[in-house]
Image (tube, helix red, strand yellow):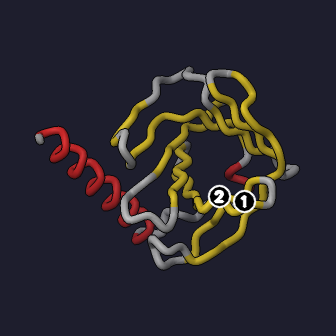
Amino acid sequence: MARNKGLSVLLIIFSLLAWDCKRNNLNSSSPLDLNGKWEIRGQVGGIAGYIQFPKGNGTQLIFNANGTYSRYIQDTLYKSGQYSLQTITAQRTQQPEKFIFFDGVNSNSYYQIQSDTLTIHMDGTGQALGTWYIKTP
């Protein structure tokens, strides 16, 4: 019971942080900001609740200026291909957001970058679902 209460509090906090970032217009990234290597640091939502990942875990997204991407899980290439970005009004925020299309398919995810943190939000869900990454050299 206490665990469910704690999870609910985390989801509320994450939702408020996401709203505050939007309210303060911190979503001012450009597609060039997405370029580079991003290592996963955490996920929130769904059955698992809140999960943190340690530095050096080997799960990465790499975006290149030529429109290609690579996904690595534990330092092993999982998938690579082409990506593109489109600004679409998100169901969750009712605001224009930058959506990522992987291999021509809408991932139903939009992103925000603040400093060295990339947050990818799932749209169209009844709860706060998101994954965040830290930019690595």
In this picture, is 87 found above or below 108?
below
Q: Position of residue 50 (x, y in %)?
A: 35, 40
Which of the 4 image quarters holds residue 92?
Answer: bottom left
Q: Earlier in the sequence, mark 2 or mark 1?
A: 1
How many angstroms separate mark 2 from mark 1 (CA)?
5 Å
* Identity of the residue furthest to the right in this view: 66
Residue under pointer 2? 107
Front-lying residue, 29 or 45: 45
| Residue 108 percent coordinates (x, y) | 60, 62
- Labels 2 & 1 near each other (Cβ < 8 A): yes
| Residue pointed to by mark 1 | 101
Q: Amino acid at mark 1?
A: Phe
Above or below: residue 135 compared with residue 19: above
Question: In the rendered structure, which amino acid carries the disc numbered 2?
Answer: Ser
Task: Assess disc 2: are there few (<14), some (14-19) or many (≥20) residues with their C-alpha within 10 Å of its C-alpha.
Answer: few
Quarter of the picture holding the C terminus: top right
